[in-house]
Each structure stands twice: as structure tokens, then as C-alpha cells.
Amino acid sequence: MTIDELIVEALIAKDKFWFVQEFKVVEQTDKTVTGRFTIAFDLFVQVFLSERSGRFSLVLVSPSGRLYGRDQEQGLWHRHPFGDADQHESTPEGMSSQPIIQFLTEVEEILVENELI
């Protein structure tokens, strides 16, 4: 994924999910981008991509820290499961061709099931 592709998918995702209040690019360089989907005052999803290293991170964050996440490092995906987000679970199936939309779908399930919003 490129920075431009990430931003395009993020803008599409912003309008697709009822719980997303806004999306904004927090920081961008020639090779990296950090974006944030605001869910509530103290709840958001942050996405990070480094074109140089290939690192791609998606994380659901609350005041207590990471609640859930998925990361791609060196071409391999792993998950930080909800309820035990310090753990790393290998996910050899990876992510779909629309990782932001897939992640926000997973986040929606977590938010509803755990009454976080």
C-alpha cells in the first residue's frame, strides 16, 4: 500500500462507518503517514504506514492505551487481540485488499459487543 492509497481508502472508510466522527492526517512525510479516525472524545483508531520499511499498523486506542490492533512488519501480519492487546497472534491469512475497511469492521464488532460507545 502507498500513502496515497491509504488516504483514499481512509476517506472512503470515513463515510462508510456510522461510528466514525472524522478522519484526519495527523502527520505525513515523503515516506510515512499517520492518520486518525475519531470515534469519541477519548476513543480513536490510528493508522500508520511507512513506505520505506513496509510497516503498517492499525490500532484502536482508549485512554488506557491500545485495546486492539493489527500490524504488518516485514510482510507478515499479526494481531493484538482485544482483552489482551499486549499479546501478538500471528495471522498468516493477513488482511484483505482493503485493510482499513476490514479493521474498522472488526472495530465495529468490538465496540458494539463491549458497549464501548
Image (tube, grey):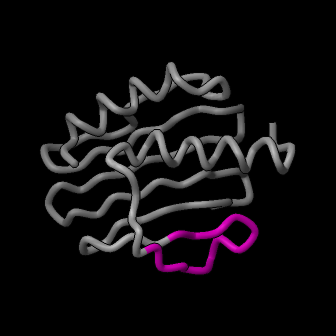
Residue extending furthest toward the right: 115
Assess whether residue 86 is covered by the magenta stretch: yes
Asked if residue 113 lies left or right of residue 59, the reply is right
- The quarter holding residue 39 reads top right
Kindly identify the residue that appears in the image at 61 percent across and 49 percent down.
Answer: 106
Residue 50: x and y, percent?
A: 24, 56
Q: Is residue 63 above or below residue 66?
A: above
Q: Is residue 102 above or below residue 84?
A: above
Magenta part, dominant SS: loop
Q: Quadrant of the C terminus?
A: top right
Kindly identify the residue that appears in the image at 65 percent across and 23 percent down.
Answer: 18
Assess whether residue 80 is covered by the magenta stretch: yes
Residue 52: x and y, percent?
A: 14, 60
- The quarter holding residue 5 reads top left
- The quarter holding residue 35 reads top left
Residue extending furthest toward the front: 93
Residue 61: x and y, percent?
A: 63, 52
Kindly identify the residue that appears in the image at 39 percent across and 70 percent down.
Answer: 77
Asked if residue 10 lies left or right of residue 112, the reply is left
> Which residues are drawn in magenta?
79-91
Kindly identify the residue that appears in the image at 39 percent across and 24 percent down.
Answer: 11
Viewer-nearest residue: 96 or 28: 96
Asked if residue 115 lies left or right of residue 36, the reply is right
How many tags in the picture?
A: 0
